[in-house]
Image: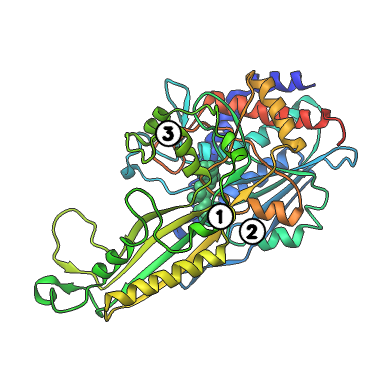
Amino acid sequence: MVDQFLEYVEKHQNDFIERLRKAVAIPSVSSDPNRRQDVFRMSEFLIDELKALDAINVETRDPGQQDFHGTPLPLPPIVLATVGNDPAKKTILVYGHYDVQPALMEDGWDTDPFTLVEDEQHRLLGRGSSDDKGPVLGWINVVEAHKSLGLEMPVNLKFCLEGMEESGSEGLEPIIHEEADKYFKDVDSVCISDNYWLGTTKPCLTYGLRGVSYFHLTVQGPARDLHSGVFGGTVHEPMTDLFALMSKLVTPDGKILVPGIYDQVRPLTDTEEKTYDNLAFEMHELHDAVGSAINIHDSVRHVLQHRWRHPSLSLHGVEGAFYNPGDKTVVPARVVGKFSIRTVPDMELDKVTELVTKYVNDEFKKLNSKNTMKIVCSHAGNHWLASPEHWSYVAAAKAVERVYKVKPDLTREGGSIPITLTFQDALKRNVLLLPMGRGDDGAHSINEKLDRSNYVEGTKLLGTYLYEIAAAKPE
Ligand code: BES
Ligand code: ZN
């Protein structure tokens, strides 16, 4: 039966690409309130697709409203759908997100980000192609293949699709807890396809993610923007305070300066050290991915350890700063510095917020400034680590060997999918990350792409994984 499925996918790849084209055309940017309607439209697109495939039950849950700088904004629905409910079969929960990062032509895209374009190298370019519309549609392609062939699915499938992942998964966590004994009751294992291969040639299975805690640091002083000629040298300037504080968060070689942060990091054991032997990754792949040879660490091992299992602190931007071209002699009245910390086992979210808040307050006091300063954690998502010995990983490894004829690497990731640990803890089930795209897909960047072969072979992989689960001996 798996051969019939594989043949169907091969034959119908252009139809699958049309499905992706329709999805990419909906600019479902969750961080932009002006695009919220499009995020809702994207949920309707998925609901229609699932209903057309006789998903037995397509339901939604309403996560309520978001407080967007004081304005209430409705949150897009959680889309739930069940395909098959045979008690003799395993039930796999598939999570994915249908929102995307912002994308503008001005950012430097070569083609319109919301028009799927296939280039000469068979790369499917468009925002969300790899993160995460391609993989979500991959699962739907699997269901379509079975329906069209009149084949039974090898397992029961449950979908949980959200539209706020890129903005911290607001509203999803309470729904998972609430539904743990209801919608999610029969789930045996969870599979998420929302990450990437380590490099560009070899598939991987992923068992770890970093968490992320995001901070807003506001400094406010004058009642309005000021002329620097008239007031420069006579008042405490908010941006000067902000830069003084931001410069004390992290060193140029990546060391976090917040006291106590490293105390919570799990020590590296010899056993863990061995997991970094023989991974299919070379320094030039880091250079290619960033477009420059600006590595802090000289060995691949240390690059990956700093990506996967050490915390990092990044400075993201300053709201309220003068950033246009040209010269303007302004003293901004209020500036908000944004930074985030990627967290790792065994860091605790509350502890991280406490340490950062105390340190920034102490440093601000040292400035003797008469401005006011406020630091808040705007969102925080947990890190996650699973045990890759679980039957779901065994089945996935077999599926990779069948489709790609290679043994997958076992990897962790530096990025975050905030809800992963919630699934593991609330459902008490194993979670597997099974990526579709390549390490150079450019998620969040300009010219995001998914190679045609990754979309097609990736769809085959997701389906084959379900067959391998069904074929495994009961544990
Ligand atoms: N698909 C990514 C997660 C990811 C990133 C996996 C890098 C592997 C490598 C996801 O859509 C994402 O970008 N998540 C955000 C979460 C944040 C907004 C809470 C992230 O990591 O910045
Ligand atoms: Zn994603």
Residue 164's disc number: 1
Q: Could you tell me how far apart the alpha carbons at marks 2 and 1 are, in whole angstroms?
A: 8 Å
Any part of residue 415 in sight: yes
Name the one closer to the observer, 100 or 330: 330
Q: Quadrant of residue 154?
A: top right
Q: The disc labelled 1 sits on which kind of residue? A: Met
Q: Could you tell me how far apart the alpha carbons at marks 1 and 3 are, in whole angstroms?
A: 36 Å
Q: In which quarter of the image is residue 319?
A: bottom left
Query: Residue most toward the right?
Result: 88
Where is ligand 2, by quadrant?
top right
The percent position of residue 35, horizontal first and vertical second, equals 47, 55
Comes first in the chain, label 1 or label 3 = 1
Residue 371's disc number: none
Comes first in the chain, label 2 or label 1 = 1
Any part of residue 38 in sight: no
Q: The disc labelled 2 sits on which kind of residue? A: Leu
The percent position of residue 237, horizontal first and vertical second, equals 22, 73
- Secondary structure under tag 1 reads loop
Pointer 2: what residue? Answer: 172
Answer whether labels 2 and 1 touch (C-beta < 8 Å): yes
Q: Nearer the viewer, mark 2 or mark 3?
A: 3
- Secondary structure under tag 2 reads helix
Pointer 3: what residue? Answer: 299
Q: How crowded is mark 2: few (under 14 residues within 10 Å), some or many (20 or more)?
A: many
